[in-house]
Amino acid sequence: EAGVTQFPSHSVIEKGQTVTLRCDPISGHDNLYWYRRVMGKEIKFLLHFVKESKQDESGMPNNRFLAERTGGTYSTLKVQPAELEDSGVYFCASSSTIYEQYFGPGTRLTVT
Amino acid sequence: AQSVSQHNHHVILSEAASLELGCNYSYGGTVNLFWYVQYPGQHLQLLLKYFSGDPLVKGIKGFEAEFIKSKFSFNLRKPSVQWSDTAEYFCAVTRNSGYSTLTFGKGTMLLVSP
């Protein structure tokens, strides 16, 4: 069984540019989560999809961040325009139950 | 809001030494507790979890954790570490109310020297 995959693994962009991160969850997992870890800080929740619906987006920092989940399968997280403080590692996780989450390798975003 | 505190940010041990990583959480209700591990170059993996029942939980690779409700703690232990245990360890909680968002601690970087 394939695990959670994320693309790209690393992205370097300039302030003001747009970046789109992609997450492919484990097949059949209805729950998909985005988390972010800024350097030196804890991993923080961004949002939670159940199928294609946003269950909870209380962790999204501001309206520069837009998450979508097409047809309840893969998800994208767009940052537009990117700011320096958006740098960090963005993790995606998926689950079939509400109690155990499987994480992807993360996308390291560097905004210069 | 709930929070998780991990006592040590960096731990250095020699092989065969015993390990205990502290984790405390703050939340007045019932929680589910987790330890995740991230080995160098790999993704976060679940090490062990506690939902209910026996407060002493055994996980993979010889790790165990004990839930002490009165102390709001869920410390991770291993009697004898190996070089391959070098990794970053994260304690996390979810509220036991159907709300499944993980709240993480800041992580503990463990370095085991051969």
Image: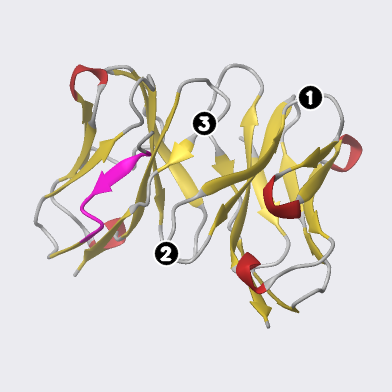
Report the side of B59 relative to A108 (left or right): right
Q: Residue furthest front?
A: A1
- Which residue in the protein does label 3 denote? B101
Report the side of A104 relative to B48 (left or right): left
Q: Is residue A39 magenta?
A: no
Residues at marks 2 and 1, common chain?
yes
Q: Residues within 10 Å of mark 1 (few under 14, many from 20)?
A: few
User: Which one is in front in this view, the residue at disc 2 or the one at disc 1?
Assistant: 2
Q: Amino acid at mark 1?
A: Ser
| Kind of element beneath mark 1 | loop
* Quarter of the image with the N terminus of chain A in it: top left
Q: Earlier in the sequence, mark 2 or mark 1?
A: 2
* Quarter of the image with the C terminus of chain A in it: bottom left
Q: Amino acid at mark 2?
A: Gly
- Which residue in the protein does label 2 denote? B41
* Separation of residues labelled 1 and 3 (CA atoms): 18 Å
User: Which one is in front in this view, the residue at disc 2 or the one at disc 3?
Assistant: 2
- Which residue in the protein does label 1 denote? B52
Q: Earlier in the sequence, mark 2 or mark 3?
A: 2
